[in-house]
Amino acid sequence: MDKKNTKASKGRDRISWEKLDNTATLFPVIATEHLSNVYRIAANLTEEINGELLAQAVKRVTDQIPFFKMRIREGVFWYYFEDNNKSLPPVTEESKTPGAYIDKSKNNQYMFRVTFYKCRINLEVFHALTDGFGGSIFLKEIIYEYLRLRYPEELKDEKHKISSGIYLDSEDSYVRNFKKNKKYKKYKSSRAVMLKGEKLFGGRLGVMHGFMPFTQIKASAKKRGLTVNQFIVGVFVYSVYKEYLNSSPSKYPISCCVPVNLRPYYDSHTLKNFFAMVAAEFKPEDRAYTLDEVLNIVKDNLNEKITQENLNDILSYNVSNEKNMLLRIVPITIKKFALKRVYGASTHATTATITNIGNFRLKDPYSKYVENFYCILSMSKGQNMKGAVLSYKGIMNINFSSCLADTSIQKRFFRLLAEDGIDVAVETNGVYYE
């Protein structure tokens, strides 16, 4: 049931319960075994992982970042986070598809899991808990602690504590930055091109990585007057136009959803979700389009939507629903039904999602033990393909996850980059060849 936000028992420095953030309220309602809303952030180390030491590292870090020791409970009017005093789920060797559903009853009610495979550490997080920013902070702290345990002599001068107390911040930055805006517009979703086709056998998830020098992709973007994000999204939209639409006109636009990290815009360091969704749209008409034409259309779309004013409007609109007194007293069973209906109606509005979770940095002397990072997104209703981007040590990793057997869009994407002079190395998880 709903309660007032109170402190935990005396002597402890964390709260016993807290509200879900504005974005997180949707995920418990829509998550299913087949649409998990779980993402993976992983790191490849230079040597094979010691599972016992990794489990010790996870325990130590989770004790120091108590936000990750929360579970979801269902109240009378809404879901809420509550302290989870159960033992952590075991750290095991990877055995499931990336981004597989986290059955909280089998995971001691935790909303994350850590697995490993050879040299790789995988962190998988249910999106209700945090977004890619929060997940990346947690994974990096696990890596630091693991390396201190793995190489005690080499790292004996390193302190056994999280790198910065700022990451203990778990405010709801949506609510803190909410300003009532009587002029905000209601955001309506219209139908977009949907990527359909033969699915991979057995519900498998196909993963394709492209590794490339960041300086090269930045140069390709800069010579066209684009940001790296605009360039990547634009090349993807053009790839859909060429491969899925076969360069034909379409009644519906190709709509690529781009999550925007709101923390830099509002001076926030919260571990909770804090992002807004904008869409880059391109509706091909009855003529042929060049890559540069599509890139400029995408650029103009994103420039128009990623502004402080528009982000303020999005935040105001989303939080105003949460603050509506009539809606607040509606029982959760009715809210869940309504949310499912609204979400179901909106799933036809997005062709795919591409998220960039930024440039990963590890402190010295830890960085020499880690070769690369990558992120994988699970599928959503109506979205059979997603992309995730990050950089580390000057190498950008652009990953596409898909439940479709056809890989022509991904291949076109990487081929276009190669044709522009970018050195691309492509890897897959082998599912496409089974």
Image (spheres, rainbow, N blue to C red):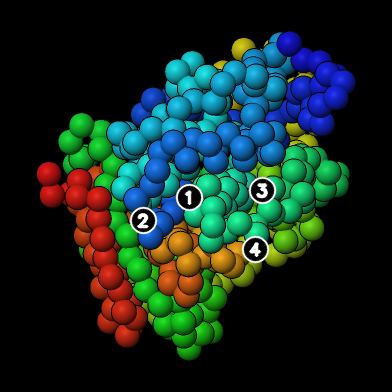
Which residue is most to the bottom? Answer: 223
> Please, is residue 179 above or below residue 126 in the view?
below
Which amino acid, by three-letter code, is at mark 4?
Ile
**Of labels 4 and 3, the one closer to you:** 3
Q: Mark number for residue 160?
A: 3
Is the Cβ of the residue at disc 1 closer than 8 Å to that at disc 4?
Answer: no
For mark 4, give the secondary structure.
loop
Residue found 53% across the figure and 47% down from its top? 149
Which amino acid, by three-letter code, is at mark 2?
Glu
Of the two numbered discs 1 and 4 on the same chain, state the one appearing first in sequence: 1
Dot 4 surroundings within 10 Å: few (below 14), some, or many (20 or more)? some
Q: CA distance from mark 4 to mark 2?
A: 41 Å
Estimate the x, y position of residue 331 in percent, counting from the top left.
70, 12
Residue labelled with disc 1: 150
For mark 3, give the secondary structure.
loop
Estimate the x, y position of residue 137 in percent, counting from the top left.
61, 50
Is the Cβ of the residue at disc 2 closer than 8 Å to that at disc 3?
Answer: no
Which amino acid, by three-letter code, is at mark 3?
His
Residue labelled with disc 2: 47
Which amino acid, by three-letter code, is at mark 1?
Arg
